[in-house]
Image: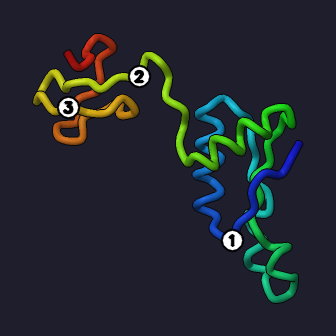
């Protein structure tokens, strides 16, 4: 295991973990509950930490976090909602306007 991120912002650490897991990289958050011990322990010791389970994946994980987004796949494309006609970007699976779920065969033409 390798630590790749530490922060006092627990939400950011969990968001980073979600990004990594969406990319197929197993990761865990440690020290989630230590913020309540700040003052009794040094603040740097109370930060939430993100650890990549497989150290071989650490460089790719750091690159994903540095870019702040998942790499786009070659088959990612915008799509048009079949119900209301709204154009949506590839990462969305549901229309923001009407709530219709993306169908596999509804790419933007």
Q: Nearer the viewer, residue 108 or 34?
A: 108
Q: Which residue is mark 2?
A: 76
Q: Nearer the viewer, residue 49 or 67?
A: 67
Disc 1 versus disc 2: nearer the observer? 2
Q: Is residue 95 left or right of residue 6?
A: left
Mark 1 or mark 2: whose residue is earlier in sequence = 1
Q: Which residue is mark 3?
A: 87
* Secondary structure type for disc 1: loop
In percent of width and height, residue 89 lies at 31, 33
Query: Measuring 29% from the left and 17% from the top, which residue is drawn there?
Result: 103
Q: Where is residue 21, by image quadrant?
A: top right
Query: Measuring 87% from the left and 82% from the top, which residue is drawn there?
Result: 41
Q: Is residue 12 left or right of residue 55?
A: left
Q: Where is residue 10, by image quadrant?
A: bottom right
Q: Is residue 101 left or right of residue 81?
A: right
| Other-residue count near label 2 (Cα within 10 Å), few / some / many at <14 / 14–19 / ≥20 | few
Quarter of the rendering occupied by the N terminus: top right
Mark 1 or mark 3: whose residue is earlier in sequence = 1
Q: From the viewer's perspective, is residue 84 above or below residue 104?
A: below
* Secondary structure type for disc 3: strand
Q: Which residue is mark 1?
A: 8
In percent of width and height, residue 43 lies at 80, 80
| Other-residue count near label 3 (Cα within 10 Å), few / some / many at <14 / 14–19 / ≥20 | some
* Separation (CA) of disc 1 from disc 3: 37 Å
| Other-residue count near label 1 (Cα within 10 Å), few / some / many at <14 / 14–19 / ≥20 | some
In percent of width and height, residue 29 lies at 74, 53
Q: From the viewer's perspective, is residue 13 above or below residue 55?
A: below
* Separation (CA) of disc 1 from disc 2: 34 Å
Query: Measuring 71% from the left and 33% from the top, which residue is drawn there?
Result: 25
């Amino acid at each position: 295991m390798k630590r790749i991120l530490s922060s006092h912002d627990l939400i950011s650490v969990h968001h980073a973990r979600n990004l990594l897991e969406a990319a197929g990289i197993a990761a865990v958050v440690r020290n989630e509950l230590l913020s309540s011990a700040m003052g009794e322990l040094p603040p740097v010791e109370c930060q939430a930490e993100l650890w990549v389970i497989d150290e071989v994946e650490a460089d790719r994980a750091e690159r994903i976090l540095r870019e702040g987004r998942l790499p786009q796949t070659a088959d990612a494309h915008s799509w048009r909602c079949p119900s209301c006609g709204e154009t949506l970007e590839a990462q969305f699976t549901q229309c923001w306007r009407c709530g219709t779920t993306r169908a596999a065969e509804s790419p933007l033409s």
